[in-house]
């Protein structure tokens, strides 16, 4: 692939150099059409039975993106009071939010309860706490299905080595606590992990959860989690997640379950990354080029404060080079091996190591692909650097500022 941003018409005719000059760098840039397309795909994973996709908003909580999710018809998952507040502000009705919490306080639970937001409890202790503050309440429980998957051990959220979910051997204790506090268990949910392109582990977890569901009578919903991956190596033509084949196999499993269970509860999933990752890039400026011990370093303003995934997970992000408003193609005769790094005082502040890239010059732009998920949502003010702005390339081609750049006055407001 010569250029993803050209093939996808990511900037819709806008000059990325002019966008960078107007809004500054580093800069998060989103494409509305790509985000809408991916959200529509997840909304139709299951069409034969009652089904709802919940956008896992921890990936990106920008209000404009949440409003896109609302308009497309997907629901949303929240992991915190802050995310619940953002979803309510975006216009989500409480019943279209699912609070999937982990090790939270009674006060945070009360916020969900007081606002009528459905809640899932992640442990026996948390289920007991919920019962103590909301006797007679309705809730779901998160089950550890015994199968995990993901691109890194830190994002595997099921199996034997994870903090999440209630183990299958403790299910009887769920019923005991529910009876003690007069709770009604209306749903069960799971999440196996994040960024898998092979659906086999997820589908194995579906089998497990459906088997476990037989122990629960009259469930209103079964939530299978998300984690569908995206091709981060797209410049090398990595294949994307086969949603069509996945949907077919998923549906066949439900075909076998429903006659056994006796009814078709609402089926749910919790995609996050898949919805927004490919719809976002980061524009950064090259400020320094130097050699150290035979290594060529390309110094940019895209530090680990702006995109932490490479430092935290050793994650790969494709990077395109833009010079004078034009993409520099990856002509194999002109590639050179470089390490692209940021401006943070950490040796781990590296976007990529020893990667073959087109010739890069001072003041060029780099375009970091697939940064719509876990970009801004995980950014920080480390080294007291300002959080970047976010802009949207709208469906009509206009460029809209959807979150202004942080200012030093914003930082000082806490004192």
Image (cartoon, rainbow, N blue to C red):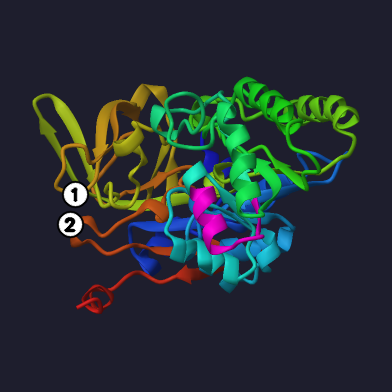
Question: Which element is circle 2 on?
Answer: helix
Relative to residue 265, is residue 145 depicted above or below?
Answer: above
Q: Residue at x 78, y 48 (%)?
A: 220
The answer to whether any part of residue 222 appears in the image is yes
Q: Is residue 357 magenta?
A: no
Pointers 2 and 1 in contact (CB under 8 A)?
yes
Residue 390 position by quadrant:
bottom left
Residue beneath disc 2? 383
Question: Which element is circle 1 on?
Answer: loop
Relative to residue 264, is residue 88 depicted above or below?
Answer: below
CA neighbours of label 1 inside 10 A, class few (<14), some (14 to 19), many (20+): many
Could you tell me residue 66's position as x and y percent?
Answer: 59, 62
Could you tell me residue 361's position as x and y percent?
Answer: 26, 43
Residue beneath disc 1? 344
Q: Earlier in the sequence, mark 2 or mark 1?
A: 1
Q: Which residues are magenta?
A: 126-139
Could you tell me residue 218's position as x and y percent?
Answer: 81, 43
């Amino acid at each position: 692939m010569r250029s993803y941003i050209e093939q996808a018409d990511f900037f819709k005719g806008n000059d990325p150099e002019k966008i960078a000059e107007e809004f500054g760098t580093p800069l998060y840039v989103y494409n509305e059409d790509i985000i809408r397309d991916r959200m529509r795909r997840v909304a139709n994973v299951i069409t034969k039975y009652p089904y709802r996709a919940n956008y896992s908003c921890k990936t990106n909580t920008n209000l404009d993106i949440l409003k896109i999710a609302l308009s497309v018809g997907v629901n949303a998952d929240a992991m915190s009071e802050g995310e619940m507040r953002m979803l309510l502000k975006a216009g989500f009705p409480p019943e279209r939010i699912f609070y999937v919490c982990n090790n939270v306080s009674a006060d945070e639970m009360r916020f969900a309860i007081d606002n009528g937001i459905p809640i899932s409890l992640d442990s026996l202790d948390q289920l007991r706490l919920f019962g103590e503050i909301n006797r007679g309440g309705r809730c779901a429980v998160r089950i550890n299905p015994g199968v995990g998957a993901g691109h890194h051990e830190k994002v595997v959220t099921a199996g034997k080595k994870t903090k999440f979910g209630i183990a299958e051997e403790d299910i009887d204790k769920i019923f005991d606590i529910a009876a003690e506090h007069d709770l009604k268990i209306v749903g069960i949910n799971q999440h196996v992990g994040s960024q898998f392109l092979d659906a086999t582990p997820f589908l194995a977890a579906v089998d497990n959860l459906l088997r476990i569901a037989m122990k629960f009578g009259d469930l209103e919903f079964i939530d299978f989690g998300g984690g569908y991956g995206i091709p981060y190596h797209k410049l090398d033509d990595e294949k994307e997640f086969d949603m069509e084949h996945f949907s077919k196999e998923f549906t066949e499993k439900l075909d076998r379950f429903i006659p056994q269970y006796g009814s078709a509860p609402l089926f749910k999933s919790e995609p996050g990354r898949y919805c927004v990752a490919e719809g976002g890039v980061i524009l950064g400026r090259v400020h320094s080029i130097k050699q150290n011990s035979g290594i060529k370093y390309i110094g940019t303003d895209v530090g680990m404060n702006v995109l932490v995934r490479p430092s935290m997970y050793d994650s790969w992000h494709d990077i395109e080079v833009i010079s004078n408003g034009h993409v520099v193609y990856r002509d194999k005769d002109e590639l050179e091996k470089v390490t692209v790094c940021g401006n943070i005082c950490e040796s781990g502040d590296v976007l990529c190591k020893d990667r073959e890239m087109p010739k890069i010059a001072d003041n060029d732009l780099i375009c970091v692909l697939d940064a719509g998920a876990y970009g801004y949502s995980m950014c920080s003010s480390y080294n007291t650097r300002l959080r970047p702005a976010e802009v949207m390339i709208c469906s009509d081609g206009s460029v809209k500022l959807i979150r202004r750049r942080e200012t030093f006055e914003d930082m000082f407001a806490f004192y």
